[in-house]
Image (cartoon, rainbow, N blue to C red):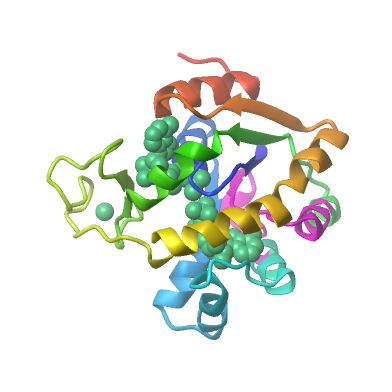
Amino acid sequence: MRIVLLGAPGAGKGTQAEALAAYWKIVHISTGDLFRYHRDHGTALGIMANEFMAQGQLVPDGVTQAMVEERIGQADAGNGFVLDGFPRTLPQGQALAAMLQARHEKLDAALYIEVPESVLMDRLVGRRICPECKANYHVAFHPPRVAGVCDQCGAVLVQRDDDLPQTVQTRLAVYKEQTAPLIAFYQGVGLLRTINGNQSPSEVTLAAVAALGGTHD
Ligand code: ADP
Ligand code: ADP
Ligand code: ZN
């Protein structure tokens, strides 16, 4: 199973990618997590990428595509993957198609998680993440058992610096301009599956599994 997730920042891609990866026993590949890993480890790629991330802008296509190509070539991605946050531009969508073709692999679906713009800001400014295990929370919609502490590993939760309101505005504008055209791109190649992301996370997961042809048990 090879899936890409489409949707605005805050649509629930990371949340659903976790669930779908567990359901199909495939890897969850988040380009945002990969860039944050590089940034936190001070690699050359991470230092460069952070100049764009901190502004709410996209990291240039060339380096992003190279990072993804390397990742999907690793052994654990052989059974399939959920790509979360890639592609984010039309050139990235074309590059992914070429990468998969060269590997004699194909994409099964592009799942578009549709959410009204009005709910995105609240979701993003309330998001908290675990810096250790990358678990994802929300102060109101998905709070940890103990405020500010990760349920899974006990680390102190943090807010992403790009989840502050000013940067969120930029990211939403970048999404509309550069990423939303991928919806028509995947529609055109017959891979688009659209689900309603404005319901509880477990309801979204049910809709996603159904749209992707799985059966829930
Ligand atoms: P994305 O990866 O698309 O940016 P996330 O999965 O990180 O989105 O979700 C953004 C925030 O909204 C997180 O704090 C998450 O806990 C919360 N969230 C995710 N799905 C839902 C949902 N269906 N309803 C309410 N809040 C949600
Ligand atoms: P969200 O889903 O909340 O928008 P991500 O964690 O997916 O955030 O991405 C965080 C940041 O990492 C983006 O704002 C961008 O700077 C960078 N990034 C992630 N994926 C890509 C990509 N495919 N192309 C370019 N930049 C990316
Ligand atoms: Zn944790």
Image: 46 above or below 15: below
Q: Is residue 46 left or right of residue 142?
A: right
Residue 129 inside the magenta-drawn segment: no
Image: 170 above or below 145: below
The spot of residue 127 in percent (x, y) is 35, 50
Q: Is residue 32 left or right of residue 110?
A: left
Q: Quadrant of residue 61?
A: bottom right
Question: Residue shown at 73%/34% (left/top)?
Answer: 108
Image: 91 above or below 27: below
Question: Residue shown at 79%/42% (left/top)?
Answer: 106
- The quarter of the rendered structure image containing the N terminus is top right
Total marks shown come to: 0
Is 16 in front, or is 117? 117
- The quarter of the rendered structure image containing the C terminus is top left
Question: Residue shown at 30%/35% (left/top)?
Answer: 141
The spot of residue 7 in percent (x, y) is 60, 42
Q: Magenta span covers which residues?
A: 70-97
The quarter of the picture showing ligand 3: bottom left
Can residue 4 be seen?
yes
Q: Quadrant of residue 107?
A: top right
Is 204 in front, or is 134? 204
